[in-house]
Image (spheres, rainbow, N blue to C red):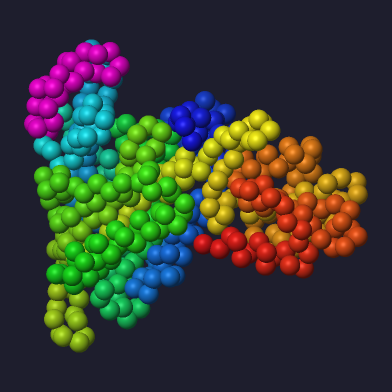
Amino acid sequence: MENLTMDKIVNYAKNYGFVFQGSDIYGGLANSWDYGPLGTLLKENIRNAWKKRFVEENRYNYGLDSAIIMNPNVWVASGHVASFADPLIDCLKCKSRYRADKLIEDFTNGEITADGWSNEEIEKYIKDNHLTCPTCKSSEFTPIRKFNLLFETKIGVVDDSKNIVYLRGETAQGIFVNFKNIERAMRAKIPFGVCQTGKAFRNEITPGNFIFRTREFEQMEMEFFCKPGTDLEWFKYWKDYCVNFLHDLGLDDDKLRMRDHAKEELAFYSKATTDIEFLFPMGWGELWGIADRTDYDLGVHEKHSGQDLKYLDPDTHEKYLPYVIEPSVGIDRLLLAILCNSYSNEILEDNTEREVLRIKYALAPYKVNILPLIKKNHSEKAEELFTLLSKHFSTSYDESGSIGKRYRRADAIGTPFCVTIDDETMNNGTVTVRNRDTMAQDVVKIEDLVNYINDKIQF
Ligand code: GAP
């Protein structure tokens, strides 16, 4: 859709019950968001599609659900306590606070990312290119300080520094520390992957752009353990796998692009990293990061835990630390991409306007909407149908307003099928099924209805 703005999507999401401002009745909490009834359904459908594709349909992979609060040594070993930090810079004049690398990214419209740059390199770029404060246009900034993103909390009843624990900054570490458990319990042979979805927490300096960057978000991550030397092949395999998944979710090809990290941008432990970016209303942004993390994570956990995390190949008797390919995506960001990609405001042949969410059927919050044509004549039968269909797929029921208005409401939230119950239903047991995209109507026998819909909504 032309000219889709972030404001438009935020209002749409709020009005239709996808996403609300967090703690709204208390004036909100900046950058915290609550998922409403439709947002919850959509999020679950995205999560389920990912689990189906990455865990159930992939013979190499297993699932996991690890704890959010882990032994703090996990985060010491992983390097997060020492260096999971963003470069913080303040404007000396108006005191606005920024992520210094983001200033450069915004200044160059995303052409330059300062990932992997030292503080000195960032400061030099800002000075040499005369970057100014986006708020007051001053060019006077403080030196850069590192700001750690881990959220600290305390465990237990005694209030001292020994009780400090962290809310996990990524779900990945829960997978690394369970590598041996899974290998043993599942008799897993390399290569294999472990997948999990769950909340992650980061004290972001500049959250924003709605649910694009928040302090509390959900990740879907996989760590794929493979033999060193085979890692670049697997890196390519998983990149293709992720892009295919995004296509199958309905994201348009011209709104997706791959960005390979340049050598100087790579994290010191990474051999290769590619971001899949999406064209959001505010510009291109990272949607999915895919990285070859080498044996870095297992190596540091082996060192800090004192446990042998090497893999013994039962066929060749070689012993080695596996390399890891990690595709990591945030559900919230993916949900935003899907909303932006699917929302449109169409002018119909009769010059009326319709708001429609052309979302993949499998992702639609409701698959079918039940509409009794005349409440007093058809609602009893309609309720019977609701009971029948809701056992198979998420179903809504709408008996207020004209049939045209009810169709429009269903279109706006992306419901693929509207089932109208009328006198024909009472006399011959048939219903009219209207399709969201074509607006064409089919007459279907009640006994065929479940199969008719089921066939069309599979992922
Ligand atoms: N384990 C690797 C890792 O966490 P990342 O690039 O920091 O890598 C992976 O995060 C993905 O998680 C991102 O591509 C994005 O989709 C999502 N993500 C990261 N930070 C986020 C935030 N503050 N808010 C929403 N989503 C976020």
Q: Residue drawn at (64%, 35%), measured in percent from left and top?
A: 348
Q: Main secondary structure of the magenta part?
A: loop
Q: Is residue 120 left or right of residue 458?
A: left
Q: Nearer the viewer, residue 267 or 215?
A: 267
Residue 237, given in percent of the width and then of the height, sits at 28, 64
Q: Nearer the viewer, residue 99 or 379?
A: 379
Q: How many marks?
A: 0
Q: Is residue 210 above or below residue 71?
A: above
Q: Nearer the viewer, residue 29 or 222?
A: 222
Q: Is residue 217 visible?
A: no
Residue 55, given in percent of the width and then of the height, sits at 41, 67
Q: Nearer the viewer, residue 34 or 395?
A: 395
Residue 151, given in percent of the width and then of the height, sits at 32, 42
Q: Is residue 92 above or below residue 429?
A: above
Q: Is residue 374 visible?
A: yes
403 falls in the magenta region: no
Q: Residue drawn at (23%, 55%), measured in percent from left and top?
A: 291
Q: Residue drawn at (83%, 46%), measured in percent from left and top?
A: 373
Q: Is residue 234 above or below residue 268?
A: below
Residue 218, given in percent of the width and then of the height, sits at 41, 49
142 falls in the magenta region: yes
Q: Is residue 88 left or right of residue 342?
A: left
Q: Is residue 367 left or right of residue 42?
A: right
Q: Residue drawn at (82%, 49%), measured in percent from left and top?
A: 372
In the displayed image of the protein, which residue is found farthest to the front?
Answer: 349
Question: In this picture, which residue range is highlighted in magenta?
Answer: 119-143
